[in-house]
Amino acid sequence: MATPKDLPDVGGFIRDLRRNAKISLRQLAEQAGVSNPYLSQIERGLRKPSAEVLQQLASALRVSTPAMYLRAGLLDDKEGHGVLAAIAVDADLTMAQKQSLSQIYETFRRENTRLAETQAEAEAAQADQPASPPVSQAADLANVAATGPTTVGGTPTEAVLESVAVTEAGTAPAPGSTSIPQKKKAAEAAEEETS
């Protein structure tokens, strides 16, 4: 994987994102709330933007702020932000796909952290009590093991992925539901078989 030193400077990164998004320098400057000449200087490497300006540019370009901070050298790659930066610079992905992948990645990381904390708490509680864990705690751990990680709201991770897929592809019929013409055809076929 490329390290931040192998990657272009933050100005070049911003310019590449802007060009991939097919927006002009002036449009990006307006969306980010910075002046056109200032943004031009940033892109050419003549000015180093502040964290606040980087956040505004990340928002306008629809990339994650940590990816922008990583490229500017404000973050270390210890916490997986290199993945976010790699997603952000992938020329084969659309902006919507980059956003979705970044959100999924960050959701997985948060969920894994929450799951590790829950497991550590359960182990600590188990160490304090020589008896077996309460039934509700055992059921919670069994549920997590059966369904996989869940989001903060408690929905399984698969539901998060499905909602992203629906967002990308549009709404789809619910599983197991059939349309009315399909139901009529099935009913007619059943009548023909009984006749």
Image (tube, rainbow, N blue to C red):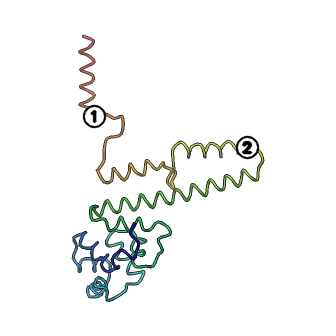
Res 171 label: none
Q: Secondary structure at mark 1?
A: loop
Residue 143 versus residue 53 in the image, above or below: above
Disc 1 from disc 2: Cα separation: 50 Å
Eye-nearest disc, 1 or 2: 2
- Residue found 33% across the figure and 53% down from its top: 167
Front in this rendered view, residue 167 or 9: 9
- Work out which quarter of the rendered image holds the N terminus and state it: bottom left
Q: Secondary structure at mark 2?
A: loop
Q: Amino acid at mark 2?
A: Ser
- Residue found 23% across the figure and 31% down from its top: 181
Q: Given contact means CB atoms under 8 Å apart, are the residues at marks 1 and 2 in contact?
A: no
| Circle count | 2
Q: Residue furthest right?
A: 130
Residue 183 versus residue 64 in the image, above or below: above
Q: Position of residue 42 (x, y in %)?
A: 31, 84
- Residue found 29% across the figure and 82% down from its top: 43
Mark 1 highlights which residue? Answer: 179
Front in this rendered view, residue 134 or 82: 82
Q: Amino acid at mark 1?
A: Ser
Q: Earlier in the sequence, mark 1 or mark 2?
A: 2
- Work out which quarter of the rendered image holds the C terminus and state it: top left
Mark 2 highlights which residue? Answer: 132
Mark 1 closeness class: few <14, some 14–19, many ≥20 residues within 10 Å = few
> To which quarter of the image does residue 30 belong?
bottom left
Mark 2 closeness class: few <14, some 14–19, many ≥20 residues within 10 Å = few
On screen, residue 84 versus residue 21, left or right, reads right
Q: Position of residue 84 (x, y in %)?
A: 40, 66
> To which quarter of the image does residue 10 belong?
bottom left
- Residue found 30% across the figure and 54% down from its top: 168
Q: Position of residue 73 (x, y in %)?
A: 43, 79
Q: Position of residue 85 (x, y in %)?
A: 38, 69
